[in-house]
Amino acid sequence: MKRRDFLKASLVASAAVVGTSVSAGVTGQPIDSRKVSKIAFPEKKPLITYSDRPPLLETPREVFTRGITPNDEFFVRWHMPEIPTFIDVETYRIKINGLVENELSISIAELKRDYEQVEVTSVLQCGGNSRSAYSPVAGGVQWGSGAMGCAKWKGVRLKDILNRAGVKKDAHWIGFNGSETAAYYETPNFVREMHMDELDDYVILAYEMNGEDLPYLNGFPVRLVIPGHYSDSWVKMLSNITVTKEYQKLFFMDVAYRVPDNSCECETPEEKYKTTKPITMMNVKSVIGYPTNNTVVAHNSHVVVRGVAFDDGHGIRDVLISTDGGKNWKQALLKDADRYAFREFRFAYKPTTYGKVTIMAKAINRLGAEQPFAQDVKWNHGGYKYNGIDSVTIEVI
Amino acid sequence: MKKIILLSILALTTLFAQVDEKVEIPYMPYEIKMGKGFDAIEANCLMCHSFGYIINQGPQSRQFWHEKVVKMIHHFKAPISKEDEITTTNYLFEHYGNGKEK
C-alpha cells in the first residue's frame, strides 16, 4: 500500500473508532517510490537526493541484495551547510587533547604507519532511517529505507591512540569534532561525546572503506566508526578528539537524536514524553533488496527474494519470509557475516497465484528480539529507530 | 495560480571528486513556490540549508511549521527577526500547509 493510501485508510479507521480527528501516531511502510536524481554527486552514482546543501543522499532499495554496499551507492548525510571542499592530506592533522599526558597531532601518514592497522565490517545507519513511515510526520529528512549501508572499514583503534596519548585518571568523556561548519558562529558545532566505558576494540578511526579511501562525502580523510551505534556518533572528517572529566552539554547530544526515555520509546503527538534518552544502539531490522515494489514476475517462475538483516552486534539468528501478508512464515537461507555486518538472506519462491503478492521479511537476532509489524511500531516525535517488518508488493502474471 | 520557478540552474560539469583538487558539490534546482513572504524564506532559510529541506517535509500544519522556524532560532541560532518568524511561518503554511492549525 502506498503511504498516502495507508494514511487515508488509517484516518478513516481512526475516525470511525474515536469519532474525532486523528489522535495517536500511526506507522506504515516507509516511502518507497522515490527515484534517483539525474545529478550525481562527487564519487557517487546518482542517488535519491533530498538536499544539496547540506548533501542528503539515499541508497535505492535494490542495492540491499548485497552484504557490502558499494562506496558510490553509500548514503550521505551532513548537518551543516559548510563542508570543506578541499582537504590537503599532507597537512591534515587529527588533534588529541584535553585530559591526556601528551597531546598528539596525528597526520594521515602517521595513522597508517605508526599504529596497528585493523578492519571491521559494520553497518552504518542513520537513526532517522525510514522516518517517512511515521505519521503525523516526524520532522526531519523523510528517508525511505536507504539511509543505511554496510562497509569494510580500515583504520586504527581509538584505544591505541588514546593509550599513546596517555589518558589521565579522572577522564570520563571523549568528545569528537568534525570539520563541517555552520553558517553562523553561534550555531552549535557537530560535536559528539562518548563515555570511556563504551570504548572497545571495535571503535576505530577509519581512513579506508571497502578497500578505497573514504569517499569525500562519507567523511574523507578519516571518520569515527562505532559499530552497533547509529551513525550520528560516527563523526566525519574527524579533526579533534578531546578527553574531559565532565560531560559537555551539546545540542547534537542533548536535543537531537533522542527518543522518549520509557520502555516502549514511544509517545503520542499530543502528549510528548517528558524525558528523553540518546538513540545509541540499533535495533533488529531487515530490508528486502529484490524483488522491489511493482516488480512483475511470471506465474510458476523462479523468484529469489534477497535482502540484508542486521542489529547492534548480537547477530542475526533467523530471517523469516512471508508471501501471504504475514500469516505464514518460512526460514530464509543466511550467509555468514561478521557480527556488526549486514547478513545477506535469500529465499526461493515460486508464485503459484496470480495478481498482487506481498512479500515480507522479518529478522530475529540471537537474543530473540524480532521486528514488529510496521503498524505496531510506536510513534516518537523524532521519527527515530523505525524497524518494522519490510514489505514489497509484486505482480504475478 | 501559483508560479513555480526553478532556482539555481547551473550547467554541471564533471563531478568526479579528486581529493587532490577541490570537490564540487552540484547545485540542485528545487521547485519552490513563489508568493508573499518568499523573500524572507530566501533570506533566512537558504543560509543554512536548501529548499529541499522544506519541500521534503510534505504538507504540514501551521504549528508544525512554526515549531520548525522556532527550532532554527532557538537551537541553531539563526538570526531570524520576530517579524520574519511570522512571515516565514505564514509562507510555509500557505504554500506547504495541510490546512490545519495544529
Image (tube, coloured by chain):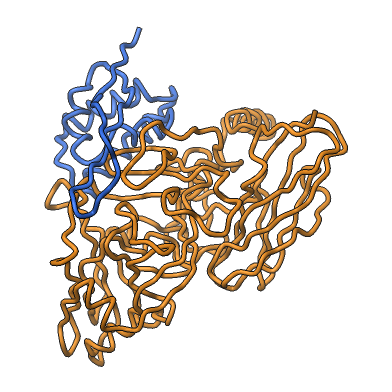
Chain colours: A orange, B blue
Kindly identify the residue that appears in the image at 72 percent across and 64 percent down.
Answer: A318
Q: Position of residue A89 (x, y in %)?
A: 19, 64
Above or below, A275 against A288 in this view is: below
> Residue at the location (29% across, 24% down)?
B90
The quadrant in which the N terminus of chain A is found is top right
Q: Residue at point 14% right, 52% down? A: A186
Which residue occupies the foreground of this view, B6 or A298?
A: A298
Most distant residue in the top direction: B1
- Total labels: the figure holds 0
> On the picture, is A99 further left or further right than A64?
left
Figure check: A342 above or below A43: below
Q: Position of residue B98 (x, y in %)?
A: 44, 25
Most foreground residue, A243 or A293:
A293
Q: Position of residue A37 (x, y in %)?
A: 41, 33
| In this view, A204 is above or below A388 | below
On-image quarter of the C terminus of chain A: top right
Q: Would residue B37 appear left or right of A28 to someone viewing this image?
A: left
Considering every residue shown, the one lying at the far bottom of the view is A169
Residue A173 rendering spot, x and y as whole percentages: 29, 78
Side of A30 where A43 appears, left or right: left
Residue A203 is drawn in which quadrant?
bottom left
Going 30% across and 26% down the picture, which residue do you hit? B29
Res A284 quadrant in image: bottom right
Residue A389 drawn above or below residue A296: below
